[in-house]
Image (spheres, helix red, strand yellow):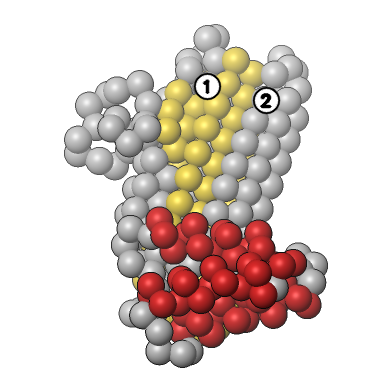
Amino acid sequence: MTLIHSTAIVDPRAELDPTVSVGPYAVIGPHVRIGAGTTIGAHCVIEGRTTIGRDNRIFQFASLGAEPQDKKYAGEPTALIIGDRNTIREFCTFNIGVPGAGGVTRVGHDNWIMAYTHIAHDCRVDDHTTLSNNTTLAGHVHLADWVTVGGLTGIHQFVSVGAHSMLGFASAVTQDVPPFMLVDGNPLAVRGFNVIGLRRREFSPARIAAVKQMHRLLYRQGKTLDEARTAIEALAVEMPESAPDVAMMSEFLAGATRGIAR
């Protein structure tokens, strides 16, 4: 108990690993579970049915697990689940889910989430993402692995953002963003593909060439979406090293529900 500051209020029903550190004036509710090595900063409020994994760093004034900002919510036992090794900076707000859509807001592992980020109900943030200051996710948004979001960017409800893509500063993201793409603006526009990010993740030249070709097929050759999808699927045979990347793109395009950013 020496790791819990004397001014913190921790409900006796909460489940905290003995190595969890809780700062001054933090408030932790009865249905909260927190894993080993996680640190909770001063004045944080963690409530609702919130589960937090290992070795997270949660900075002061964060609000995690509050009721969703949805008028339909009527106190149902929904949840927020946060994985391991995330950095969650000051004044972030993550809400629990709403019934009818799974009822769970999920944040994965190894994410770098900067100050004032809002993650609304039923969002899913996968692994290794970077969300810059004032990123705002409306309900049901999905960010795949390695997504980077520029500051002051808003993402419309039900939008999906594919793996390895980058959203530029102060963008209005109202359509699905395919994997690997580089987008920004209001209205949103595709500026290219995220070649710098792929190099940092040690994509081979062959894989980067395949991503470049997928970008050309989608955005530079005047094809319809169906024509582009067919041509992209053929790349798995023409460029076998890129087959998993092509499969990911094909699956994303087939499942896009809001139309893709073009």
The structure residue drawn at horizontal position 52% and vertical position 48%, both measured from the top left corner, is: 125
Q: Residue furthest top?
A: 12
Looking at the rendering, which quadrant does residue 222 occupy?
bottom left
Instruction: For marks 1 and 2, give the CA distance.
Output: 10 Å
Dot 2 lies on which element?
Answer: loop
User: How many discs mark residues in the rendered view?
Assistant: 2
The structure residue drawn at horizontal position 46% and vertical position 84%, both measured from the top left corner, is: 219
What amino acid is at disc 1?
Val
Q: Is residue 76 left or right of residue 58?
A: left
User: Mark 1 highlights which residue?
Assistant: 32
Where's residue 163, x and y in %? 58, 60
Where's residue 229, x and y in %? 46, 71
User: Residue 40, relative to residue 241: is it above or below?
Assistant: above
Q: Is residue 243 left or right of residue 79?
A: right
User: Residue 72, relative to residue 143: is it above or below?
Assistant: above
Where's residue 54, x and y in %? 70, 31
Q: Which mark is residue 46?
A: none
Dot 1 lies on which element?
Answer: loop
What amino acid is at disc 2?
Gly
How would you rate the neighbour count of disc 1 (Cα within 10 Å): few for under 14, some for 14-19, many for 20 or more?
Answer: many
The structure residue drawn at horizontal position 55% and vertical position 15%, both measured from the top left corner, is: 14
User: Mark 2 highlights which residue?
Assistant: 35
User: Residue 47, relative to residue 123: is it above or below?
Assistant: above
The structure residue drawn at horizontal position 45% and vertical position 42%, both measured from the top left corner, is: 94
